[in-house]
Amino acid sequence: MEFNLADLFEHTADTYPDREYLVADGKRRTYAEMEVRANRLAHHLLDQGVKPGDHVGIYAYNCAEWVETLWAVFKIRAIWININYRYVENELAYLFENADLVALIHGREFTPRINAVRNALPLLRHTIVIDDGSEVDDKQIADLGSAPYEEVLAAGSPERDFPPRSADDRYVLYTGGTTGMPKGVIWRHEDVFFALGRGIDPISGAKAQVPEDMAERGRNGAITIFPIAPLMHGASQWGVMSSSFLGDKVILCAKFDAHRVWRTCEEEKVNTILITGDAMARPLVEALEEPGVSYDLSSMLAVSSSAAIFSSSLKEQFFSHFPNLIISDAIGSSEGGNNGIVILSPGNTSMAGGPTVRPIEGSIVIDDDFNEVKPGSGVIGKIARTGYIPLGYLKDPVKTAQTFFEVDGVRYVVPGDYARVEEDGTVTLLGRGSVSINSGGEKIFPEEVESAVKSHPDVYDVVVVGVPDERWGQRVAAVVEPRPGCTPLLDSIQEHCRSLIAGYKVPREIHLVETMQRSPSGKADYPWAKELADSRNASLAG
């Protein structure tokens, strides 16, 4: 039996048609309503000549239309492309061209940016505009030639009369990572379903045998899940899609605001929120601690984090507000899927770098010779995955060859994350090699240092980079956003860190900033932090 993402959604829609599926800024959809609207959009795209394998961009904030587009494109065996709404024109032009977009569904707000790069995109032949309430004038829409989204749906057929689909249909996830231009990771539907779509339950290890197994898991009732990060980010995409296969209810909001999140949790009786580490966790917990703030959050059962550091101190703060909360921390990547997960309890949240997790099926740590690292050996290796892995990077054979390997007939993906295997077989994430610091021959992983610095009481946020050093080659620099009213001192941070990490990893300098620059998904912007530290050091030297 094959697993196709559109088929999985349709099976859930047939099983639970009257369940409420999606709530997005006041718009509500049952599973049946989502199915019909997605069918209408799918038929329109077919009428415009979109074929299986064609690429259709989604360029909008989180909204109901984002999810409708997701399913509509998969229904006709085309491939949707996630577009980072923070990109400026040159980044946008690169992504549009690299992805070979033939069609684009976009928020009205982004029309001027698209017009600015439109002439460089000969393949783009059809655009549809979502009315997002922005004040972009109608002339801009007319110049681009975008069809109004609701008119498109009204004219489309509601029928599900599409040709059969395949487990080999493609899903592409564009990832910006920590350095370089975005790359499109190409997955087969079946592979990504088992790697990221809960085809293998990350806690129990139970594996779906037939597509119907997923909807059957929802027979005992639905939970309400709230992926907070932008849908252009893989973690939120899979929060939505995996929940859709189970018959759960999904909540979305266009933009992150801590109090808005908690109000929504109260109003919609949210059970689980999905966050991307400290960038969301810190404002959320601090909003709860403001004087006079009170929300009924008795429905809250779990917080799940991935894709960025979720500091121990913040986890403990969450537990202080929700003593019975289930907090999970996961590691993974766009290329490697879900590599492991840990369930935490109060007083048991300490970290030695990134999280220490129980690896899931297919996830291992290997040395430079592709030998599996033995538990407790102390060897630092790289996280690898076998089995359900991507085909490679879109239009990038060089990067594909650097990341995907075949050894003795087994394919591996090795994205570049370093890790250590503990004596009990758990895996501690240390960080991405591309941003590691080499100080006197010692390799230092920024995430490990960031975890230590963030636990300092005066530190709100931090990104750690290496800067040039005449003696050691590089030294550790911390770009720090202080907590309001605080001015952390280097001596204090060093003393604090020495009790948590080895001395050679302790920051040798700090650079205070009013606001930390991060990606929309909460990932550290290492190039920005390094440029800032280098420029300040150059100014001092001058």
Image (cartoon, grey):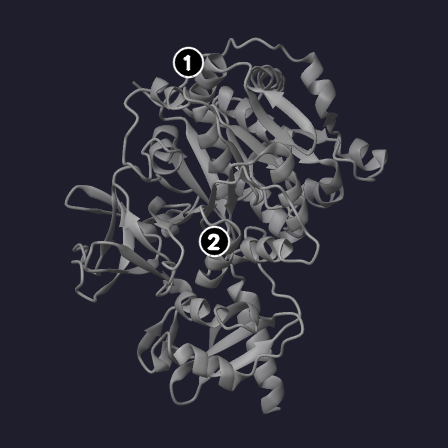
Crowdedness near tag 2: few (<14), some (14–19) or many (≥20) residues, C-alpha within 10 Å? some
Residue 430 spot, x, y in % from top left = 35, 63
Q: Is residue 253 visible?
A: no
State the mark number for residue 164.
1
Kindly identify the residue that appears in the image at 56 percent across and 83 percent down: 489
Query: Given the image, on which type of amino acid does mark 1 rest?
Result: Pro
Q: Nearer the viewer, residue 200 or 392?
A: 200
Mark 2 element type:
helix
Q: Nearer the viewer, residue 16 or 136?
A: 16
Query: Given the image, on which type of amino acid does mark 2 rest?
Result: Phe
For the residues labelled 1 and 2, the Cα–Cα distance comes to 48 Å
Kindly identify the residue that appears in the image at 53 percent across and 43 percent down: 98
Judge whether 161 appears above or below 316 on screen. above
Q: Please indicate whether residue 148 sits to the left or right of residue 383 in the image.
A: right
> Tag 2 or tag 1, which sits nearer the N-term?
1
Q: Quadrant of the N terminus?
A: top left
Judge whether 18 appears above or below 298 on screen. above
State the mark number for residue 304.
none
